[in-house]
Structures are given as C-alpha cells and as structure tokens.
Image (spheres, rainbow, N blue to C red):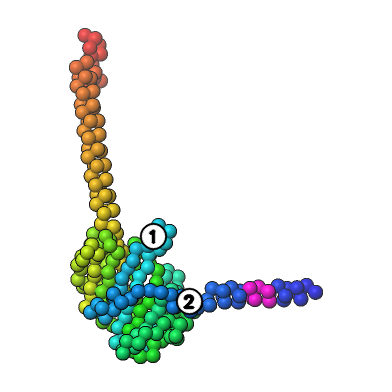
C-alpha cells in the first residue's frame, strides 16, 4: 500500500513538472507575432540593419525595433546569453517583406520558441525581416545575426559618449547626434552590439550637484580651519601652548 502511495506521488510530481514546462515554454502566440508596429521609417535607411531604441515610461520598460536586410540568410536562432545559460530572445510584431515588397506577418512564418532559443525561418533570404523586443532601463544588447552594416539610434536625449556613464561596443563606430538623438554606425559589426547609455540632462544635473557639494564642503573646511587657527591664537595668548620640559621645577606657565 505504501509503495503504491509513493509511486502515485512520484507520478503526480512528474505530471506537475511537465505541466509547468508546458506552461512556461508554449512559444510565442500569434497575437504577439502579429502585434501592430511601425517599421516604414527604418526601412528607408541605407544600413543593412537598422535598430531604433525607444525609451519606456515610468511603469513600462523600453523597447527596440529592428529591421534586417537579410543578404541571403533564411534561418535564425535568436538567443541571449545570461550568467547561467542561453535563453530565447523574446520578440513580437514580426514582419517579413519579399524582395518585391509583399508583406507577411509573423504568424505566417515558421517561428518556434523553446528553452534556449527562438527559431525563425523566412521563405526568401533576399527579403527583409523586422521584429521588436524589450530593452533594459539604460542598457541594450543584441547579437549581430546578419552580416553587414549596422545603425543604432538611441532615445532622445540619451548618450553613450561619457566613459563614466556610457559605453558602446564593438569599437570602430561613427557617432553623430541628429535632432537630439545619438546614432551609432558600424560599417561591419561582429559579435554582440552592447550599449550602456545615460540621460545627458541627468549627467549635467549630477555634475552641478557635485560642484555645489564641493563648494559648500570647501567653505565648511575653510571655516573650520579658521576656527582652529583662532583657537590656537587664543591659547598662545594665554600661554597654554608653551611646552613644559621634564626638568623644569618652576611654576606652570602663567603663574610666574
């Protein structure tokens, strides 16, 4: 009887585990694949890959839009590295355009997501692929899935140029600011494009606050030093700072 109970309990645990796996790895829904998104502005760029990072709100994370001229690539395995393992890249609003301009939505493509990657296939490697996904609050990372030139546009007012607060890799990029938006351009990028950016206005405010703290602190130190000097002068006037030698048998200073 006990053995039957143990076997039954094991079976229940296994079923729950399988149900959990199914719950968390059911792939990307058609609604997410077909979600509305605007890509026309990115399709007009000359770069092979155009990425636009959009800042999130107070209660929402940021988002990026990416458009790829495929240059012969038909199969993709989208993943991102974490400290522990490879995880699938979460994407939505997938679109594909044939070389003749015919548009296909994500639910019409072969898209499959498992524990480690999001796999996608397109019918013609000479077309154009677009998708969107979430970003961190002030960071962005995305592998270079397609060979060619890359152009990344940051949110308005955000910068990577200050080495203390920002960073961009790989190196070898051109940087310009157009309409208060920083753009980074690589003729050819390998590996992973990784950005750390900051608010230019926020850094100016921070530097201003540091300056105020330094000035106020300097005034405080000067005032303290002046008070110590005055106290030292008063002690000397009263004769309280005269050194007493060990063999001096006379009365203390000030009592002669």
Q: Earlier in the sequence, mark 2 or mark 1?
A: 2
Q: Residue furthest top?
A: 256
Horizontal and vertical percent for residue 103?
37, 85
Q: Examine the image and state in which quarter residue 63 appears.
A: bottom left
Disc sitting over residue 111 in the figure: none
Q: Are marks 2 and 1 in contact (CB under 8 Å)?
A: no
Which residue does the numbered mark 2 point to in the structure image?
31
Q: Secondary structure at mark 1?
A: loop
Quarter holding the N terminus is bottom right
Judged by its main secondary structure, the magenta piece is helix
Report the side of 23 relative to 198 (left or right).
right
Does the segment drawn in magenta span residue 12? yes
Q: Residue drawn 31% across and 77% down?
A: 40
Q: Secondary structure at mark 2?
A: helix
Query: What segment is highlighted magenta in the picture?
Result: 10-16
Disc sitting over residue 57 in the figure: 1
């Amino acid at each position: 009887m006990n053995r039957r109970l143990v076997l039954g309990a094991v079976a229940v645990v296994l079923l729950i585990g399988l149900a959990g796996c199914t719950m968390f790895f059911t792939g990307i829904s058609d609604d997410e694949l077909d979600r509305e998104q605007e890509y026309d502005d990115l399709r007009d760029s000359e770069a092979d890959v155009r990425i636009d990072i959009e800042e999130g709100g107070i209660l929402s994370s940021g988002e990026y839009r990416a458009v790829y001229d495929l240059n012969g690539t038909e199969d993709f395995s989208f993943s991102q590295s974490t400290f522990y393992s490879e995880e699938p890249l979460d994407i939505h609003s997938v679109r594909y355009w044939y070389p003749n301009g015919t548009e296909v939505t994500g639910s019409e493509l072969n898209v499959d997501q498992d524990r480690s990657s999001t796999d996608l296939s397109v019918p013609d490697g000479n077309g154009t692929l677009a998708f969107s996904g979430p970003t961190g609050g002030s960071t962005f990372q995305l592998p270079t899935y397609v060979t060619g030139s890359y152009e990344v546009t940051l949110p308005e007012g955000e910068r990577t140029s200050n080495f203390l607060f920002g960073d961009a890799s790989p190196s070898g990029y051109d940087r310009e600011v157009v309409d208060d938006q920083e753009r980074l351009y690589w003729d050819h990028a390998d590996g992973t494009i990784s950005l750390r950016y900051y608010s230019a206005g926020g850094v100016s405010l921070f530097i201003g606050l540091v300056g105020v703290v330094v000035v106020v602190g300097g005034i405080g130190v000067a005032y303290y030093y002046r008070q110590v000097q005055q106290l030292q002068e008063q002690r000397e006037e009263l004769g309280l700072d005269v050194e007493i030698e060990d063999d001096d048998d006379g009365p203390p200073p000030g009592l002669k």
